[in-house]
Image (spheres, helix red, strand yellow):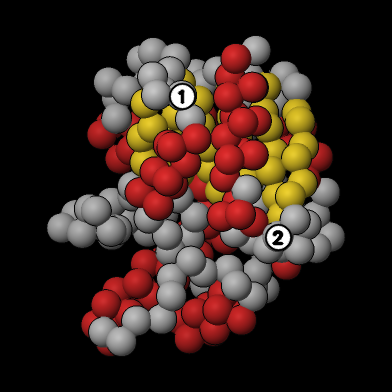
Amino acid sequence: MVLFFFPHAGGSAKSYSSFKRFLPKDMTVIPMELSGRFTRPSEPLLDNIHDCVADLIEKHSEDIKGEYALFGHSMGTVLVTEFVKQTKAKGLTQPCHIFLSGKNPPDEDVHCFENVNTASDEEIVSFFSANALSSNAPVADEELMRILNRILCTDVRMAESYSASPDEVKFDCDITVFYGTEDPLMKNVDMSSWSRFTEGKCRLYPFAGNHFYFQQHKEEICSIIKKQLAE
């Protein structure tokens, strides 16, 4: 079994490797790092969801031939949705389970900014910092901070611009939805509406905490992951 982790905006997929200690030893955990970010700094900084996912499918083509599951947090849910859309169009093997976290479905008009394309980098960085939506701690190195903020703003713009309806993409498997009850992005959001995107079951698991609630609940979340994948 392979479990792919898709990153949140401004974050490295590698950060989810910390889940591995609570998962079965025979499970392969693969961080889906986007081009131009973190562990892939020499590659182009792709700035739209379609191209980012097409690149991931090509890069991990051998890994998606067997049994696998997907986990996406925040922007990761957008990447997961587009991943299923593109792999279906290519006739590739589909996931046996999908885990979605911390974001509303991609057809709902729930956004951080009225028009993300007119929002300045400063406005995006300020909003994410003020609402504890960024996993990047301030660093003294100005050049490094500039790079991290550029990645964050690129990710936010492409995630906010993405849209897909259940008519365009439908998951063939059961899905599990996680979220933090104090997450500011969850205001006025009904996470059960993700059920419209699947032909299977949709289970919801709220956790105490903000947007990065899972930092305090990794072991519990991994227990749920193990249980769902064992069914």
**Dot 1 alpha-carbon crowd within 10 angstroms: few under 14, some 14 to 19, many 20 or more:** few
Q: Is residue 147 above or below residue 171?
A: below
Viewer-proximal residue, 60 or 157?
60
Residue at image position (76%, 31%) is 203
Q: Quadrant of the N terminus?
A: top left
Q: x%, y% of residue 151?
A: 37, 67
Q: x%, y% of residue 71?
A: 53, 37
On the question of residue 2 being in view, the answer is no
Residue at image position (41%, 81%) is 138
Q: Which mark is residue 11?
A: none
Residue 82 falls left or right of residue 28: right
Residue 77 falls left or right of residue 52: right
Amino acid under disc 1: Pro
Amino acid under disc 2: Gly
Q: Is residue 204 above or below residue 106?
A: above
Q: x%, y% of residue 134?
A: 51, 69
Q: Is residue 107 above or below residue 180?
A: above
Which residue is labeled 2 in the image? 209
Under circle 1, the secondary element is loop
Residue 143 position by quadrant: bottom left
Residue 6 position by quadrant: top left
Count of numbered marks: 2
Residue 43 position by quadrant: bottom left
Under circle 2, the secondary element is loop
Which residue is labeled 1 in the image? 24
Q: Is residue 221 above or below residue 157?
A: above
Q: Nearer the viewer, mark 2 or mark 1?
A: 1
Residue at image position (65%, 12%) is 231
Residue at image position (43%, 64%) is 10
On the question of residue 215 being in view, the answer is yes
